[in-house]
Amino acid sequence: MAGPSKVEFPGQKKQSIRMRGTKQANKETSEKISRQLKNLLEAPYAHLPQLTWAGKDSWFAFDSVTKTMKALDRIISKKNDVAWLSKRMMSRSGDPVAKAFAGSLHAAHDDEIKMVGKFGSASFGSASFIRRGDGKQGYLAGIQNFNHLTLRMLPWENHAKKGMYFFTWKGGFVCTGKNPNPPPEWLADVLSRSRFDFIENEIDGKVVWVTADLDPATVVEGGNTPEGYVRMTFHHGPVLAISLTALENPSKKDSSFIHHLALSMLPPFLPSILTIDAKWTPKGWPLDKVLPAAADEGIDKIIDAWQGLSMNEGLIAMAIRRAVLDSVDTGLVVGENWVAGDSLQSIEESLSDVAGSEDERNLTAHVLFASVSDGPDGDEGLRIDSRGGISPRNAAALEIINGASCGDILKNMWERWGLEGLASLGIEGEEAEEIWQTQVNKPKPFGTFLKGLDSARKAAQDVAKFPTRRGSIEGPVGMIHDLLLTGLLDGPGKAEREATGRHADIDSAAAAWTWLLTVDRSRGQEWHFEPNARDKAGAWLSASKDMHKCGVELLKCDESQLESQREQWQQALQQLKKVTGSA
């Protein structure tokens, strides 16, 4: 059923209908498109790629590009026949490039441009164009915006899928057929428009492009350098190299170089025209020493992702360095430095930028030296990160990540190699064992530990005088023994807190009361202890006092009296065992 008729009133403005995807052209856009369409109409062949090959494939049949060119010849010959162009641009069959070309030529005859379409592509770019005919929007945009170096390749995308290669630059647009052989001026122009400032050199007749911080001779030889570089060797001869430093410092407005290079050709498949490799070694790595095979494998994966346009270019340099560092299976890696580990001096020099005092750095160097000398456990190495945590690494080497401090290193390595570190300070034997064990059980910050080392040495020397150790004897005699040692070595206050704590049984309570009576700290403490415990303690008191007296003398004696005092301590201990029934 027909709808109601529309009523028009005098003075009413006529409504205009705008096609989806179009917009009102402003003056600047209108003038630009008019100028471009005028150029297309006047010199249509200048908007087509030049063919740099014979134009026939191996089966003696015309290839797809040549077929399209023949169809375009026909259209160009009718470029001023608007009626014919209007039929051709709406044709359901025929070459799609030719259809879009016919529509663009038809639009070139318009006297005024009011409405334009807006085409946008993440790969090819964006531009305004005249929608005319049944041609693809991208093809229309590419033909009408020939000055857009990337977008003008879009109409030829189907030909590229069939194995044909196209190269675009400011000075030209060519199709090289199935042989990807770009002209020399293509590379020069693409590099001049990239985010890097390349310097052209000639080494042994070969053109070499490098960033300013690279030596072209080293690049041609493929030598390793601590600075590192990415090298592109083009199949048609030239060599290109970018330093890792330049690669990792893009500004926000700079486009990715690899995208820029790839999108200057169609299809954007870089392996068809070049091979990419990368060179980098940690500082200190001998330049004539071959890196582990895992380094090359890791770098190859990074390069594949980069030239496949799937990896952020700003991360390439860091990823290459990390691949090499992760592969190192000998020596010691400190940040981006490598040392063999066979020289204490070289290890200490490698720690120059690691946070810590001189004393901490010296102790850390000795501990690391002992670690590298012992070698890794199995095929796995160890990594100490910037937060002081540890994790295994696949390659058998010790790695210290930038940001880790000397304290982080010592904290993780002290239990195994701390005694070797103390030996470097002249602390050995039982004294070293005591200091090492105390730091293992109750770790202090190593700056504090080293500052208090003199007092720690004195405490360790006192402990070493006694022939017995706390925790080595069981039963009530063991508790009396431990309280006596704690009071003599750590002070009576600490021992009293232990003695007045909760007791598991009568014997442990009696042992605690015995110590309190021995050192005369029992006043006011009776309520902690049952009468039976206090009665037992009275029987043990004499032997406990004798042992305490031996301990006091042992701490005061010099080296010449040490052995005799130790014997007296052992005799007093045996007497205490006898009276407590532990003998």
Image (tube, rainbow, N blue to C red):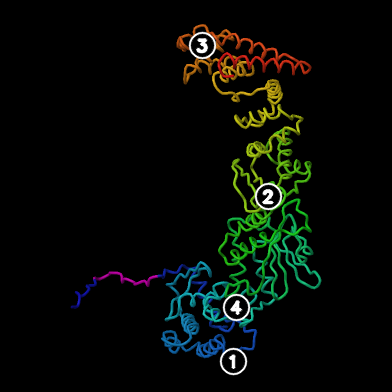
On residue 59, which mark appears? 1
- Give the mark, 3 or 2, whose residue is nearer the N terminus: 2
Residue receiving disc 3: 536
Tell me how far mark 2 sits from mark 4, CA to CA.
Answer: 49 Å
Q: Is residue 453 magenta?
A: no
Q: Residue at left 70%, top 65%? A: 231
The numbered mark, 4 or 1, whose residue comes first in the sequence reads: 1
Q: Are marks 4 and 3 in contact (CB under 8 Å)?
A: no
Q: Report the amino acid beneath label 4.
A: Phe
Q: Crowdedness of circle 4 by 10 Å Cα count: few (<14), some, many (20+)?
A: many
Kind of residue indicated by mark 3: Lys
Disc with the residue nearer the chain's start (4 vs 3): 4
Q: Nearer the viewer, residue 327 or 416?
A: 416
Q: Is residue 13 magenta?
A: yes
Magenta residues, start to end: 9-20
Q: Label 1: state its secondary structure.
A: loop
Q: Residues within 10 Å of mark 3 (few under 14, many from 20)?
A: some
Task: Provide the residue designation for mark 4.
Answer: 166
Q: Is residue 431 above or below residue 6?
A: above
Three-letter code, disc 2: Ala
Q: Nearer the viewer, residue 282 or 173?
A: 282
Considering the numbered disc 4 on the image, is that residue within a helix, a strand or a loop? Answer: strand
Q: Nearer the viewer, mark 3 or mark 2?
A: 3
Q: Which residue is mark 2?
A: 397
The mark closer to the camera, 1 or 2, is 2
Separation of marks 1 and 2 at Cα, in angstroms: 59 Å
Q: Quadrant of the N terminus?
A: bottom left
Please name the amino acid that badge 1 sits on: Trp
